Structure formats: C-alpha cells, structure tokens
Image (cartoon, grey):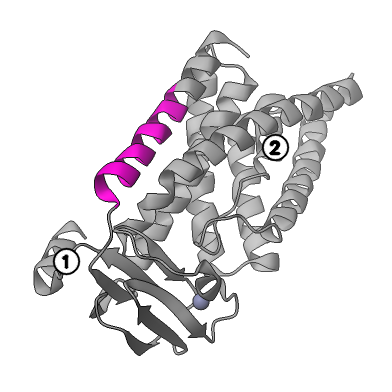
Amino acid sequence: MYTQRTNNMVMCGILTALAMIFSYVESIIPIPIPIPGVKLGVANIAIVAVLYAIGSAQAVVVNVLRIFLTAMLFGNLNSFLFSMAGGMLSIFGMILLKKMKGFSMIGVSVAGGVLHNIGQILAAVWIMGSSAIAYYLPVLLIAGVLTGIVIGIVAGLVLQRIRGRQR
Amino acid sequence: MKKKDIYLIGGIVIAAVIFFMIVHFVIQKDGAVAVIRVDGKIMKELSLSKNTTVTVAGYEGGENIVVVEQGAVYMQEADCPDKICVHTGKISKVGETIVCLPHRVVVEIRKGMCGAVENQVDSVVR
Ligand SMILES: [Zn+2]
C-alpha cells in the first residue's frame, strides 16, 4: 500500500513534468487561428495518462498544476485564462465520459480535445466581449477531434510503458 | 476504438460541418460596417463604403491603426508584442474578426450600424 502510494506520487510528478514539456512545445507552435493564446491541447496526453493510470482526482490536480506552472513559466494572463477554461471543461468532461462505460481512451480524449477548444472559445468570447469569435468554432471542433484521436493513441502508448514499469 | 467512440466523433464532425455551413452560407455575406471594440465596449463603427484610417487606443495603452479600404478592413499597424492582428490580413464578410488580444481590440464585420441598441442587448446578456 505504501509503495503503491509512493509510486503514484512519483508518477504524478513525472507526468506533470511531461505535461509541462508538451505545454511549452505547443506554446511555440502557431495555429492558424487569429486568436492569440489558443492552444491545440497537446498536454492532454499526460492528463489522459494520469486519468487512466492513477485516477480522476489526481488527473484534476496534475491538470491544475500544469496550467498554473505553464502560465507562470511561458504564458501570460490571457493564455492562463484560456487554458484554465479549456483545461477544466476538458478534464471534467473526460472524467464523466470515462465513468459512462462504452468509450475507449480515444473517445475520452476526443471529448477532452473538443471540450478544451470549446472552453478556450468561451474564455475568448468572455475576455474580448465579442461573440463573433465563435465563428472559429467549427475549425476548433475538427481540430479537437483530430488532436483527440492522436492524443488517445499516444496516451495509450504512454500507459503501456507506465504499466510495464510498474510490473 | 469502440462503437460509441465512432458515434461521438461522427456527431462532433457533423455538428462542426452544420455550424460551418450556417456560418458560410447563411450568415456570411459582405459586411457593411466594421465595429471596433476595446475590452468589449464599442468604440467606433466604420462604414466599409468609405475609405478611412483610424487609430484605436488599446485597453492598457498601445495603439492599433485600422484601415478601411475598398469594402475591406485590415490592421495596418499595432505596437502589440505578437502582431497577430496585423498578420490576420483583410476581412470583409459578416462575422469575420481581427483580434488583438494584448490590447483587447476586436474589429468585427457587421451587416449594419447597431450602436446603442446593440449595447443594450450586450449589457442584458452580461
Ligand atoms: Zn495585436
């Protein structure tokens, strides 16, 4: 029991670090949408891995840590608000879908990717006070599906490695 | 991948396509007015039929130079750090926007003048 807890803590730490690396990488990748601060949500790979390897509560904690640390290191207030809105909507949607049985990791991470983008758009509409930004929603929905599928597959690979190591 | 994954992905893609069609075939038409907002408040409304150049003060300082030329609007210059607004290029269809997040400036294309009426609607929504 003790070693299991320690193991989980170490794993959370490693995956938080992994999430931050992804956050950094995506903060330097421009996406073809003229709303600065909107991200693809690649860091979700680590969050999905925590969700499946350890648990829902830990996934929320790692996600919040990731958002704060990334904003402090490579972000600004706007990118923080976007990733907070996107990150929270995404993690709670994924927890719900995972509990709902019948979805694989890919379905869960697609929901996460799409909700992440919806959250970002809502935050942008709120910050800028202009609902015309919702115009980019279709593009962001499709982007969310594509990144979600890729993330689901990669997170599956990450999970295999974690489980292999724990055995 | 399970069956429900496919349904979920299919549903989202269909929703995106419907939303896209609504935006492009129903709403999106040549606009008549460019509305300039700073921090959500309407600062200026420019008719697209008249060529002009205006300077907009950003939310916490800074300047954006907005140009109306032959029915289209673009951000000619801005002293924001990212310059994304300047790189957005020309917009002319209803619903299109140029966003300068550092200065909280949004230029939005509308069908017609709205002014005070639109302000009221907005304050009710918020
Ligand atoms: Zn700008």
Mark carried by residue A118: none
Give the secondary structure at mark 1.
loop
Residue carrying label 1: B112
Count residues near mark 2 (Cα–Cα under 10 Å), then give few for <14, some for 14-19, many for 20+.
Answer: many
The kind of secondary structure element at disc 2 is: helix
Q: In the rendered image, is residue B61 in sight?
A: yes
Q: Residue at x 90, y 18 (%)?
A: A167
The segment highlighted magenta reads B11-28
Marks 1 and 2 sit apart, C-alpha to C-alpha, by 45 Å
Left/right placement of residue B42 relative to residue A15 reads left
- Chief SS of the magenta region: helix
Image spot of residue A107 (x, y percent): 57, 22
What residue type is disc 2 on?
Ile
Other residues around mark 1 within 10 Å, as few (<14) / some (14–19) / many (≥20): some
Residue A32 quadrant: bottom right
Query: For the point 33% across and 59% down, which residue is it?
Result: B93
